[in-house]
Image: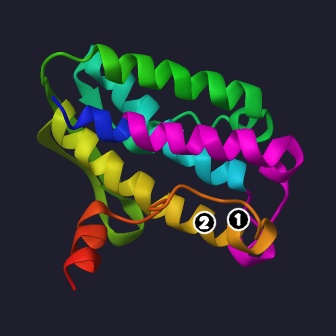
Amino acid sequence: MKTKSVSIELFKQLLFVCDQIGEKAFTDKLEILSGSTIGQHIRHIVEFYDCLMRSSETGSLCYDKRAHDKSLESDMGKMVAKIHELNGWLGSLESDKTLELEIAYPLSGVDKEKMGTSVLREIVYNIEHMIHHMAIIKIGLNQSFPDLKLPAHFGVAQSTVVYQMQN
């Protein structure tokens, strides 16, 4: 399960950002992000992984039932601890496991559907989801902290990096 190492590396990039910006910047509402904060975007990423971690024990996964723990977006220390917990879990994974994914789109008339998936497949989904939110975070950081040096490919999908290198 080498794929998990991608998640671990991306979380390290988020830890770097937290270390660089400080608590106030973590919670500042940014106009360019429609009033959301860096902390809110990181919480959103973390809670998807947390859902997956918990589902690896129960066998049932529903991202809609994530905690929405506001303290993660306002207490950077708590967020950092949660990221370390998730990296520990990812590092300890040794095999894939079948899961049942529950989804719903009630505003479109889809009340509840269930389908098969796996921990590894959901790690792949979470990687793409994380990169997407890191790209949004990057927009806020570039405006609010123009001197902050982010990792070279922060918020850019690896397939995009490879494509850009080839062209």
Label 1 environment density (alpha carbons within 10 Å; few <14, some 14–19, many ≥20): many
The structure residue drawn at horizontal position 19% and vertical position 79%, both measured from the top left corner, is 166
Residue in the picture at 70% in, 65% down: 141
If the image is split into quadrants, where does the N terminus sit?
A: top left
In the picture shown, does residue 99 fall above or below 127?
above
Where residue 100 appears, as percent x and y from the top left, is 18, 33
How many numbered marks, from 0 up? 2
Q: Which residue is mark 2?
A: 138
Element carrying mark 1 = helix
Left or right, 28 with respect to 48, comes to: right
- Amino acid type for the residue under numbered disc 1: Leu
- Asked whether the viewer can see residue 43, the reply is no
Q: Secondary structure at mark 2?
A: helix
Q: Residues within 10 Å of mark 2 (few under 14, many from 20)?
A: some
Confirm whether the magenta stretch covers residue 14.
Answer: yes
Q: Quadrant of residue 148?
A: bottom right
Above or below, 127 relative to 156 = above
Going by the numbered disc 2, the residue's amino acid type is Lys
Asked whether, in this view, residue 18 is left or right of residue 113, the answer is: right
Question: Alpha carbon of mark 1 to alpha carbon of mark 2: how far?
Answer: 5 Å
Magenta stretch: dominant SS? helix
The answer to whether residue 6 is visible is yes
Q: Are marks 1 and 2 in contact (CB under 8 Å)?
A: yes
Image coordinates for residue 21, horizontal then vertical, percent: 78, 49
Q: Closer to the camera, 102 or 162?
A: 162
Q: With 106 as the anchor, is 123 left or right in this view?
A: left
Q: Which mark is residue 141?
A: 1
Q: Quadrant of the C terminus?
A: bottom left
Image coordinates of residue 164 in percent, x first then y, are 28, 79
Q: Please give the range of residues in magenta.
A: 8-37
